[in-house]
Image: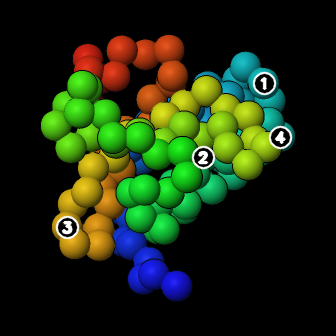
Amino acid sequence: MSPLWTVRLARRAEADFFEILQWSAVNFGRRQARVYAETLSLAIGALAEGPEVLGARCRDEVGKGIWTLHIARQGRKGRHFVVFRIGGATTIDVLRLLHDSMDLERHI
């Protein structure tokens, strides 16, 4: 088994998380917002396996060293990307949580 990676959330990613949940609660209800919070958290937590976790993609066309992981995975639905970069030997920095319809280059 490979060592786990440290996953750090930038302030902007934390703000994205809470904004997404507020919007979800208003538009879909508190229960659905809790389900979506779990979906987001599971995707972020999966990065502890490293940047090449199943579903992660290097997105150099968006920015050098930028990776994305779509949160719709393992039977869960969602429309957001976890946008991250490798921050050290075993560190991943989550930069943003962005809706998959957004222009990633513009928002990073």
Q: Mark 2 points at which residue?
A: 40
Instruction: State the image coordinates of residue 38 (x, y, percent, origin top left).
Output: 69, 52
Tag 2, which secondary structure?
A: helix
Label drawn at residue 95: none
Do residues under tags 3 and 1 come within 8 Å of each other at their CB atoms?
A: no
Real-space CA distance between mark 1 and mark 2, rounded to the nearest whole angstrom: 16 Å
Considering only order in the chain, which callout, 4 or 3, is on the residue closer to the N terminus?
4
Q: Residues within 10 Å of mark 2 (few under 14, many from 20)?
A: many
Residue 22's place in the image compared with 1, above or below, is above
Question: What is the CA distance from the residue labelled 2 to the residue labelled 3?
Answer: 23 Å
Q: Please, what is the three-letter code of the amino acid marked with disc 3?
A: Gly
31 relative to 15 in the view: left or right = right
Helix, strand or loop for disc 1: helix
Mark 1: which amino acid? Phe
**Residue 28 bears which disc, if any?**
1
**Which mark sits nearer the N-terminus, 4 or 2?**
4
What residue is shown with label 4? 31
Do callouts 3 and 4 mark residues in contact (Cβ within 8 Å)?
A: no
The residue that appears at 54% across and 31% down in the rendered structure is 80
Q: How many marks?
A: 4
Checking the image for residue 88, the label placed there is 3
Comes first in the chain, label 3 or label 1: 1
Tag in front: 2 or 3: 3
What is the quadrant of residue 61 in the picture? top left
Q: Nearer the viewer, residue 106 or 21?
A: 106
Q: In this view, does 55 lie above or below 5?
A: above
How far apart in space, not on screen, are marks 4 and 2 (Cα)?
14 Å
Residue at 50% over, 57% down: 53
Crowd around label 3: few <14 · some 14–19 · many ≥20 (10 Å): few
Q: Nearer the viewer, mark 3 or mark 4?
A: 3
Q: Are marks 4 and 2 in contact (CB under 8 Å)?
A: no
